[in-house]
Amino acid sequence: MTTPPLRLEATGISKQYASVKANTGVGLRVKPGEIHAVLGENGAGKSTLMKIIYGAVQPDEGELRWNGQPVVIKSPAQARALGISMVYQHFSLFDTLTAAENVWLGLEKTLSLAQVTTQIREVAASYGLEVDPDRPVHTLSVGERQRVEIVRALLCKPQLLILDEPTSVLTPQAALKLFETLRTLSSQGCSILYISHKLDEIRALCTHCTVLRGGKVTGEVDPRTQTSAQLSALMIGAEPPQLKHEPRKAGAVALELKRLSLAKSSPFGTTLVDVDLQVRAGEIVGVAGVSGNGQQELMAALSGEDPRGTPGTVALFGKDIARASARRRRRMGLNFVPEERLGRGAVPTLSLAQNTLLTRTETVTGAGWIRVGRVQALAEDLIARYKVKASGPDAAARSLSGGNLQKFIVGREIDAKPKLLIISQPTWGVDVGAAAQIRGELLKLRDAGCAVLVVSEELDELFEISDRLVVMAKGRLSPPVPIADATRTQIGEWMSGLWTGEGAHLVAA
């Protein structure tokens, strides 16, 4: 019996960016129907390799073979024509177009927009991915945009599907449903390149794993035979540090919400309804929930981006801030890390040093002069302390990998010594080593007496660092539950809006 050719074979792939060698002699072999993990820490060269396969980047050296035949993939359009689809970590969507229009751009022109809209609804329903085809992309949260990308890729009926962190927006139940779908695709002959920093996912789903470190392949294993610690050691050269989350008594109330209600600011937003919440000094409160259930609106109301709250509904250290500006809130000790790194957490075209000026105004004199030396020194210190892989403080924000930019932004806000830190998706797309570092820093803040509010769709993360958990669903907030009493099953059910009890609302399904 003749052995079928490899679906994809990459040999000797090398790519140099200025002083950074992203890939050096990388080899990758993917069989038909194989779910193949590509594992590596942030900056290991995974994204560059995937972009080369997808035609978005051209290699300096090396060869690609597709279904046994040599091929030069010069563009994503050519890759899609061959049967390769990719979901980027940083999305490629036009903000001013609807979800359906964005999907339509990448499909055959023989289809009408109405036909594509119908297909989106069908695929989204069968895969458990909630997508509204008619919503403009600029009204979508990061998680909702990722769902659009996944649906767009699946509509192309690919022979090779490249997925980068596909479960970061899903409930545990929806993630399991996606795994079933991927296994079905695999059984039908579709190959899948799966990039995730969730090692338990890789072990449960993937049948082969190629490990990258420093732009080179350092090993190939069957992840089903490895422990998470072994995979971590292959990836970063050591096991990530174990976090010490010891119970401690919380202090005075830092942030208090009393029946905060806000009408949605756009037709596609979420209305906040009677949100009650307390965050105390010296504790971490985690907010779980599927993206698009009001987290974006809640963060805007807390950061000062949306100062429409009724007086008395938002208090910081006992002072009413419902209609205070973001600047006033920062001066009172509130620091904020948004979910969207590029565009809100950092200006893509500006250097890391210049990006410190977004929130660290102590480097500017009262007369408005920028103290350039202090700005450079601050950026250099953040790069060193948080182990950010960058060429230096003058590196543009967009030149960093997602995880490294996240470390810089989180470090910038933690270094400001906040009294209250509000952080959204702290380790989205971040490798296990960097995630452990960020979580460790959040715990240090808590132990120093800072109040911390963490919004995350990573349940493992919330269970690891939170003292109390609440769940957001359809614009409402569940009652708080101590972490010792919380279960993943309970939180997963609450993420669908199903909770009852004293002081709680039952959100209709």
Image: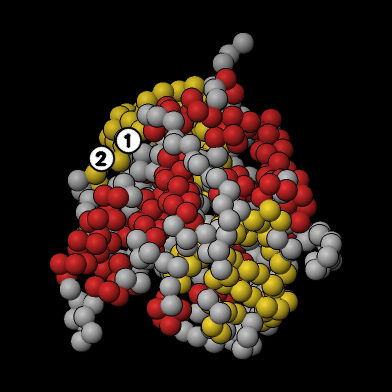
Front-most of 65 and 99?
A: 99
**Is 173 drawn above or below residue 329 in the view shown?**
above
* CA neighbours of label 1 inside 10 A, class few (<14), some (14 to 19), many (20+): many
Q: Which residue is mark 2?
A: 21
Q: Position of residue 110 (x, y in %)?
A: 63, 59
Residue at position x 46%, y 43% from top? 436
Q: Amino acid at mark 2?
A: Lys
Q: Position of residue 398 (x, y in %)?
A: 34, 59
Horizontal side of residue 451 vs 116, given as left or right: left
Horizontal side of residue 220 vs 112, given as left or right: left
**Mark 2 vs mark 1: which is more N-terminal?**
2
Residue at position x 42%, y 27% from top? 234
Front-most of 115 and 372?
A: 372
Residue at position x 62%, y 47% from top? 463
In the rendered image, is residue 181 in sight?
no
In the rendered image, is residue 230 in sight?
yes
Q: Amino acid at mark 1?
A: Gly
**Is 177 drawn above or below residue 275 in the view shown?**
above
Front-most of 89 and 113?
A: 89
Disc 2 + disc 1, Cβ < 8 Å: yes
The quadrant in which the C terminus is found is bottom right
Query: Circle 1 sits in a helix, a strand or a loop, which is it?
Result: loop
Return the mark for residue 215: 1
Query: Circle 2 sits in a helix, a strand or a loop, which is it?
Result: strand
> Coloured how?
secondary structure
Query: Image quadrant of residue 413?
Result: bottom left
Mark 2 to mark 1: distance in Å? Answer: 7 Å
Query: Image quadrant of residue 454?
Result: bottom right
**Is 407 drawn above or below residue 422 in the view shown?**
above
The quadrant in which the N terminus is found is top right
